[in-house]
Amino acid sequence: MVSSQARMTLKMRTPSLLMTSLSSSSTSSILHQNLTINSSELPGPWLSTTTGPVVRNLGLGISCFTMIFGTISNLTALGILARSRARFRRQSKASFLFLTVALLLADLVGHVIPGAFALYLHMNHRNEMQIVKPATAFCQIFGASMVFFGLSPLLLGCAMAIERCVAITQPFFHTAMVTVSHVQGVVLFMSSLALILAVLPFCGIGTYTTQYPGTWCFLQIHDPRSTADTSLALAFSCLGLTALILSLLCNIVSGLTLLRARIKSQNINTNSAARYTHRSSSASSTSLFFSLDVEMMAQLAVITVVSCVCWSPFLMRILLTQLNKSPGEPDKVILVGLRLASWNQILDPWVYILLRRTALYRVFFAFNTQTFT
């Protein structure tokens, strides 16, 4: 009798338990779908509330340091160039001076404007438990500034390398044909090219989106992306890499030409035997070694090397991602490449500060004094 009643009770409870388990499983599946949908609307799988604050705090410190240090460096280099402008004009090197000033101004503004946008996002997310996607208009402007101020220094550096190559290999043609007005037109063309590429997403060609870890905006370089997104990212990376390659080739040709001129000058002075004559010959050789052409060539060569080291990882990563040759999740690698590329705008002015002729003279004579003593 008792067992029959227990069986009846178990049969009555079984449907209720089954309904409860089904309702709980359906509720959990619905919640899982909602979380999946909500997370897909945000800029990627890197939205983790456990690691987000650590990444943001670290990025905030790096952004503040690079922005302040880069601004001070570029202002210092511009001040040095302003004091030495008479020396450049006196030796008909105004075109190189104009390109140098344009490059340093692009580096300076490229630090202030995108850096201010990045600091705003860092400060806006600092006290939040989860990263919030920035407004569409803000991300569009931020992304356009990243593209414009990223390409402008690379294109201007390429123009500087071509100008020096023509000046060293074809000096008479350079003196007769290359003027400051021509160089101003080149700077305007390079800036317009970078600006056109930056504003194409405003016309519906490509899109700007938030990138890892939610503190900067750039072209859509990850899936899902359209054909326009892929084409725009490829154009950015290929244009930057082309500028670097042309700069390297022009610097190699210019360096070989100066080296050949240096060897010829040494062969002319090999017949000097007396001590006084030897010292005079050495002084003239030193003057040739530290000539303005060599000074500018040394500065340009170091700038090209720095640009290749800083920008190549970022540009190559974007290129490989668009060609589907890069396995795995590339968000963190892109972020590291961006931070490395930002150091190009910090190191450029220090090349002009340290590789000036006066600074090289001091190092050279200090070394010679220690050698003879």
Image: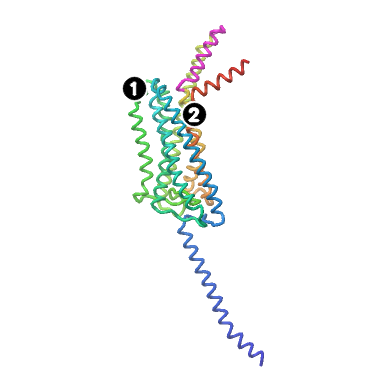
Decide: is 268 above or below 353: above
How far apart are labels 1 and 2 at the CA level?
30 Å
Q: Are marks 1 and 2 in contact (CB under 8 Å)?
A: no
Residue range of the region highlighted in magenta in the rendering:
272-293
| Closer-to-camera residue (82/199) | 82
Q: Position of residue 188 (x, y in %)?
A: 35, 35
Quadrant location of the N terminus in the rendered image: bottom right
According to the picture, the residue beneath numbered tag 1 turns out to be 176
**Residue at the limit of the structure toward the bottom, as seen here:** 1
According to the picture, the residue beneath numbered tag 2 turns out to be 353
Q: Is residue 322 visible?
A: no
Q: Position of residue 95 (x, y in %)?
A: 38, 27
Q: Amino acid at mark 1?
A: Ala
Quadrant location of the C terminus in the rendered image: top right
Q: Secondary structure at mark 2?
A: helix
Q: Does the stretch in magenta take in 281?
A: yes
Decide: is 368 above or below 179: above
Residue at horizontal 42%, vertical 47%? Answer: 143
| Closer-to-camera residue (261/277) | 277
Q: Amino acid at mark 2?
A: Ile
Residue at horizontal 53%, vertical 8%? Answer: 277
